[in-house]
């Protein structure tokens, strides 16, 4: 189950990644499988792409 701390960590990671790689128009985000399985990325990444034009690839691994 995702809690507020997980969501803040994900959001902060995206901000840092975007700041560092915005000119590439694509970034890679590392995550746990539970976050990916929750459907969060399927919900927020299309919104993120629409606003920024940046593609995000999620690499999920079990803890």
Image: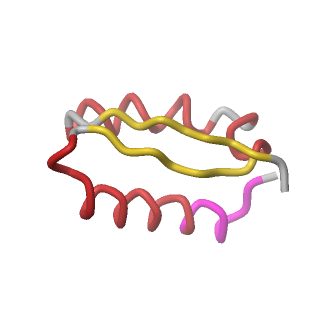
**Residue 16 is covered by the magenta coloring:** no
Which percent across, then down, holds residue 29? 51, 49
The quadrant holding residue 54 is top left
Q: Is residue 18 left or right of residue 38?
A: left
The front one of 25 and 51 is 25
Magenta region: 2-8
Name which residue lies at 82% across and 52% down.
Answer: 1
**Residue 5 is covered by the magenta coloring:** yes
| Residue at the farthest front position | 24
Image color mode = secondary structure
Which percent across, then down, holds residue 21? 26, 54
Name which residue lies at 72% across and 62% down.
Answer: 3
The front one of 52 and 27 is 27
Dominant SS of magenta comes to helix
Which percent across, then down, holds residue 6? 66, 63
Name which residue lies at 45% across and 67% down.
Answer: 12
Q: How many marks?
A: 0
Q: Is residue 46 left or right of residue 60?
A: left
Quadrant location, the C terminus: bottom right
Name which residue lies at 20% across and 51% down.
Answer: 22
| Residue at the farthest left position | 23
The quadrant holding residue 41 is top right
The front one of 34 and 44 is 34
Q: Is residue 30 left or right of residue 49?
A: right
């Amino acid at each position: 189950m995702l809690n507020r701390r997980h969501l803040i960590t994900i959001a902060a990671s995206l901000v840092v990644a975007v700041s560092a790689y915005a000119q590439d128009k694509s970034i890679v985000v590392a995550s746990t499988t539970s976050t990916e399985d929750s459907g969060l990325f399927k919900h927020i990444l299309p919104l993120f792409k629409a606003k920024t034009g940046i593609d995000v690839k999620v690499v999920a691994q079990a803890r």
